Amino acid sequence: MPDLGPLWLSLALAGITTVILLVIGTPLAWWLAGTSSRWKPAIEAVTALPLVLPPTVLGFYFLIVLGPASPVGGFWVRITGEALTFSFSGLVVASVVYSLPFMVQPLQNAFESVGRAPLEAAATLRARPIDAFFSVAVPLSKRGFISAAVLSFAHTIGEFGVVLMVGGNIPGKTKVISIAIYEHVETLNYAEAHVLSAGLLLFSFLALFSLYAFRRGSPAYVR
Amino acid sequence: MSANARHALRLRARVDFPGFRLDVDEVLELTGVTGLFGPSGSGKSTLLRVIAGLEEGVNGSVSFNDKVWQDGTVFLPACARPVGYVFQDARLFSHLSVEGNLLFAANRSADQGIALAEAVSAMGLQPLLQRHVDTLSGGERQRVAIARTLLTNPQLLLLDEPLAALDTQRKREILPYIDGLPGRFGIPAIYVSHSVDEIARLADNVMLLDGGRIVAAGRVEKILNRNEPRSSQMGFEAVSVLQVTVLEHLPELHLLRVDHHGQTLTVPAVDRVTTGESLRLSVHSGDVVLATDLPTGLSVRNVLNGTVIDIAEDPTGAFAKVDVDVNGATIRAQLTRHAVHELKLNAGSDVYVLLKTASFDRDF
């Protein structure tokens, strides 16, 4: 029986990351979908950067920004007493940035396809903007939310390079499933590597399969 | 609030778009249905959106019955203006059922006012309540949209070409519902359309909008047939509006016999009409035939006695506009100048005005 600690750690990391991304990605995507600001292309480019940068580049900058010697890392040490680097909290911060485009882009697309029209209708029916957002824009964007959450979760489960650089390989703290597989392979423990790899493969397939099946089968509305 | 109560909408707005400017500075006295008529691109929808507060960043002022909705310092957002807006594309919420759409509005409005059951019965929605909005026909969607808007207890209804996307059959189906609105709920309405027949049927007053400006306003029967050459510039044929009273419904023939200032006409039956009810009919000037002798052996059912009051010949074209007084109402005929001369028509000539029953059946 393989050590399941890395599995639970991966699930916890992906779950927490997805929740945080829903909270910060939703307003960002909403702003991007509706704005005509000249800053929009710059913000969109920054949001998409994790898609194209090697994880080592992100990891390198995270080490510098989150390290105890930096203002951010130093502040974290002062209020919590521990460093962000090589900690679970540091992994969460890095994962949020790393998976940001997987949350923001599907949501932005969903909000753009909902468009202004239903929200104008809601306004003429006395719904204030925040009310209209939650009672009209969110339910009409339901599929976008599901896509964004599934993709963010699955992408965080699958991350390796950033985790390795920011978190290292500390059992119970930063040794997530992808790191554990790497370690098993390094130590020629192929049996355990097989189990974890096959499990991750199956999980990823099922996540994507259910997403696409849902997209295909679900009508555009909820009852 | 009665249907005939007057409401004042003060409106000053200047909106610049590339190649187009809306520039309006008017006090609109609203009672019943006011038609807002103009060619495509004349600014009709923009004007409604300004009134509703959907165009932010517009310089101008809007006040309704001395309540300021917008001026230099105040801007009430759309959700705070007591306006009901019916969009051309209905804009029902596709994640909700028909009932859900109605409750969306009802839950956000004051308890007193138009009740859900009242709006449902006015628009005939009882059989549709549990339906999903994606399964509705275009006419049904607009009826739901109108009921939903009524449930916000609006003080002013804005209808933005609600029939434009519908075919003739659907228009016929929904018109009686719209027709009865102002009388039933006592809410003044501005009804935007580029169909002169729709305006003639529904509106008591009409405003003509052209090139971003209101160029004429007044009673529908005056504006629609007295605005040559404006009407031809604006791309509509002059229409005479006849105010009639229903005398008799002949269901087996699908006809109505109506009284027009003491003379009887036969017109196609319309839905939901009762004896004694007032109806407005429109007839295009090109559909009006004049005769100096009472013709026989013709299929035309409607023959009215009248007197020519004015003849306007177009010296550069084939046609002349002939205005005929029929017991105090004016009916305009478009004849060839050739016919005017052959019949020796002059102001004061007695004529028979022939109206084919089918000429009342144009759009609806």
Image (cartoon, coloured by chain):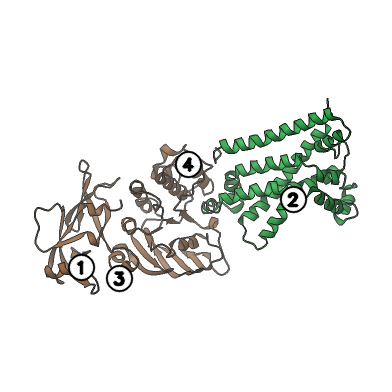
Q: Along the line of sight, which residue is nearer the eye, A7 or B50?
A: A7
Q: Along the line of sight, which residue is nearer the eye, B245 or A112?
A: A112
- Dot 2 and dot 1 within a common chain: no
- Dot 3 and dot 4 within a common chain: yes
Residue B134: assigned label: 4
Check disc 1 and report its element: helix, strand or loop. Answer: strand
Identify the colour of chain B in the image: brown
What distance separates the C-alpha of mark 1 from that of mark 3?
A: 14 Å
Residue B229: assigned label: 3
Check disc 3 and report its element: helix, strand or loop. Answer: loop
What distance separates the C-alpha of mark 3 from that of mark 4?
A: 44 Å
Identify residue for label 1: B322
> What is the letter of the green chain?
A
Where residue B63 appears, as percent x and y from the top left, is 49, 65
Quarter in which the C terminus of chain A is drawn: top right
Residue A50: assigned label: 2
Look at label 2 and name its amino acid. Answer: Pro
Q: Decide which of tag 1 and tag 4 comes sooner along the chain.
A: 4
Check disc 2 and report its element: helix, strand or loop. Answer: helix
Furthest toward the bottom, the residue is: B315
- Dot 2 and dot 4 within a common chain: no
What distance separates the C-alpha of mark 2 from that of mark 1?
A: 76 Å
Q: Decide which of tag 1 and tag 3 comes sooner along the chain.
A: 3
Left or right of A138 in this view: B119: left
Image point 33% across, 49% down: which residue?
A: B168
On what subunit does the disc labeled 4 rest? Answer: B
Where residue B19 appears, as percent x and y from the top left, is 48, 69
- Snapshot quadrant of residue A65: bottom right
Q: Decide which of tag 3 and tag 4 comes sooner along the chain.
A: 4
Look at label 3 and name its amino acid. Answer: Pro
Q: Residues within 10 Å of mark 3 (few under 14, many from 20)?
A: few
What distance separates the C-alpha of mark 2 from that of mark 4?
A: 39 Å
